[in-house]
Image (cartoon, rainbow, N blue to C red):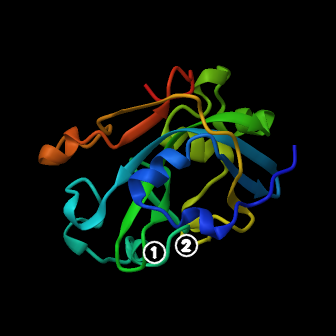
């Protein structure tokens, strides 16, 4: 398969819409070891200053969140529990919102993913935000890159026929924000995180 980065204009849409529109698109990372790609099957939206679960809650501007205050379509990576997580920056500059990519379905470079993950069960390769970054070779240093240029980019895929939504995962200490139905996934896809 050959992939090409999606146009930058794709990212000019509201965050909740972006969280749904990312489903079915292809997340691609090219490295010296090879190319690895997965179809995005699960996302979570983080709505910035008013969302207690967002890193930019209260307009918190730090070295870590700086990229979120810029234009849409950029990579926001950070580490949580030793795992690198990858997000797509959304909204116009000054509106620090992002969408976490939670799970992908492997489509290219699967042997490379096995090598990186050391997991022999296909279903476990990329069914979580830390698993998918390790499998694809996405690292914290990818922070600040545009998602519409190589080596880390989103390529056009195919939208799912059905999308399900529900509360986000792993944000228990965020008051009412833990209940917002801002997690979206391709219905019945086996690679959605557990």
Residue 159 in the image: above or below residue 140: above
Q: Is residue 143 left or right of residue 136?
A: left
Residue that numbered label 2 is attached to: 144
Give the position of the N terminus as an image quadrant: top right
State yes or no: discs 1 and 2 in contact (Cβ < 8 Å).
Answer: yes
Residue 79 in the image: above or below residue 161: below
The mark nearer the N terminus, 1 or 2, is: 1
| Residue at 61%, 68% in the rendered image | 9
Q: Where does the image place residue 138, in percent across and percent down from the top left?
A: 62, 54
**Among the 4 quarters of the image, the one containing residue 69:** bottom left
Q: Where does the image place residue 65, in percent across and percent down from the top left?
A: 37, 71
Q: Secondary structure at mark 2?
A: loop
| Residue at 25%, 73% in the rendered image | 60
Residue 185 in the image: above or below residue 151: above
Rate crowding at label 2 as few (under 14), some (14 to 19) or many (20 or more) other CA atoms within 10 Å.
Answer: some
Residue that numbered label 1 is attached to: 67
| Residue at 29%, 58% in the rendered image | 54
């Amino acid at each position: 398969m050959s992939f090409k980065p999606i146009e930058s204009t794709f990212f000019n849409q509201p965050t909740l819409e972006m969280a749904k529109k990312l489903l079915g698109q292809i997340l691609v990372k090219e490295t010296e070891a090879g190319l690895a790609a997965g179809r995005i099957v699960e996302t979570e939206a983080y709505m910035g200053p008013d969302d207690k679960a967002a890193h930019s809650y209260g307009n918190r501007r730090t070295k870590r969140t700086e990229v979120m205050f810029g234009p849409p379509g950029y990579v926001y990576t950070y580490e949580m529990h030793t795992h690198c997580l990858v997000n797509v920056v959304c909204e116009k500059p000054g509106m620090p919102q992002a969408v976490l990519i939670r799970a992908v379905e492997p489509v290219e470079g699967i042997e490379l993913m096995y090598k990186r993950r050391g997991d022999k069960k296909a279903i476990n390769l990329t069914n979580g935000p830390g698993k998918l970054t390790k499998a694809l070779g996405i690292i914290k240093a990818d922070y600040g890159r545009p998602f519409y240029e190589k080596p880390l980019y989103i390529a056009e895929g195919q939208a799912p026929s059905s999308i399900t939504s529900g509360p986000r995962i792993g944000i228990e200490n965020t008051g009412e924000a833990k209940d917002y139905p801002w997690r979206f996934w391709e219905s019945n896809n086996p690679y959605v995180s557990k």
